[in-house]
Image (spheres, rainbow, N blue to C red):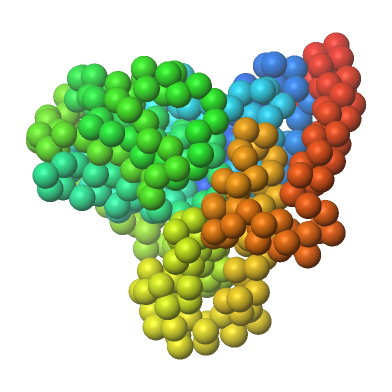
Amino acid sequence: MYGGEHMMTGIRNAGHKQFAAIPSATGGIARLAYARAKEAGIALPQLLADSGLTVAQIEDRHAPLKVKAQITFLGLVADALGDDLLGFHLAQSFDLREIGLLYYVMASSEVLEDALRRVERYSGIVNEGISLRVHIGKHVTIRFNYVGVERYSDRQQIEFWLTTIIRICRQLTSRRLIPSRIRILHRQRGERPQLEAFFGCKVEFSASADEIVLPDSTGHLFISSADPYLNELLIDYCEEALSRRKASHSSLRPDLENAIALLLPHGKAHMDEISHKLGMSQRTLARRLAAEGLTFAGILDELKLELAKRYLQEKDLPISEIAWLLGYRESSAFTHAFHRWFGKTPREMRSKEKFMTKKKHSGRAQKLYSGRVAS
């Protein structure tokens, strides 16, 4: 597909600077969103500021971006463009070589299983907030796990990566691979037919995991651009990058919240169940939380509050379903808890949010689109 010299040029362009301090994310997705919004005439400085980003960070392709900031920025751009499938749309059109080192080590592998094993081991070079797990058995399963980042706050980034992985698999094997199924944790928003036309299979939302399932024979497919000598060299680069990563001392809270959010609808968000999911005893979990000045009950209440606000913004989500998603068996129990948090019922809050959003969008529209304001 690409000659060795072309690949090495791409690696140099990806920047050895990144090896010195592996970023939380290389920021490629945020930069694609920035370009799309700029082309549409969206005023970007405020959206960047609201995300904790700067124009200088975006325009310097070697500058690391915080994963959470990238997720926030993608959500704001999607809202400004009115594109609920922004991540999916961005993933369909960019040059896969822009991924850099990770793409080239996959492209030089011999078979697709080898390429997927490489992405499992080295995905943190591109985005430390997502860990991939590949299981080769009856089916080939690629599962995405969020690390140190709240999964419930994301929609666009995960749809970008699900789409990109399928694009890479198809390009490397020169086949239009059709997954057996695609599963996504968040609720559906946007046009499902677009997604299913691209993937060629049913897309399951509100699932228990973010994953791609491919037929069992997929892993044995040969890669047309395989180059064992180049692959060995690139693996050395990847191992060097991993060895230079600093030990992570991130808070336990995001991983705890991800585990709680997944079990809330099933009424299983209890400390014993959560500690088991995190691979530790209840005593260890309590001790680690105490070291951060946190408690399990406090995090649970605060997460319910944050999720309640987010779910209410989804106008097609009934109050009764929000109650279920938060682990309440009765809507009245949820309404009572919500009133205790905010001094309003869920319906009163939704009416207020609807009014404020309409007012905000009216004012923003004048700023964003008047004369196609440039950033």
Location of the C terminus by quadrant is top right
Residue at horizontal 43%, vertical 37%? 205
Q: Is residue 289 above or below residue 243?
A: below
Res 215 → quadrant: top left
Residue 57 location in percent, x, y?
67, 41
Question: Where does the image place residue 336, in percent across and percent down from the top left?
Answer: 73, 61
Of the pair 293 and 66, the residue shown nearer to us:
293
Q: Residue furthest top?
A: 371
Q: Is residue 129 visible?
A: yes
Residue 351 pos. (x, y %): 81, 38
Vertical order, 148 against 25 (above or below)? below
Question: Along the horizontal axis of the image, is 302 left or right of 145?
Answer: right
| Foreground residue among 316 and 305 | 316
Q: Residue 107 sits in which quadrant?
A: top left
Give the side of residue 292 with respect to residue 146, left or right: right
284 vs 201, left or right, is right
Q: Which of these two is toward me, 210 or 22?
A: 210
Residue at 90% over, 26% down:
363
Residue occupying image coordinates x 37% and y 74%: 276
Point out residue 116 in the picture as x, y percentages from the top left corner.
Answer: 24, 42
Q: In what quadrant of the picture does the N terminus appear?
A: top left
Describe residue 190's horizontal placement relative to residue 234 as left or right.
Answer: right
Can the viewer see residue 11?
A: no
The answer to whether 145 is drawn above or below residue 374 in the figure is below
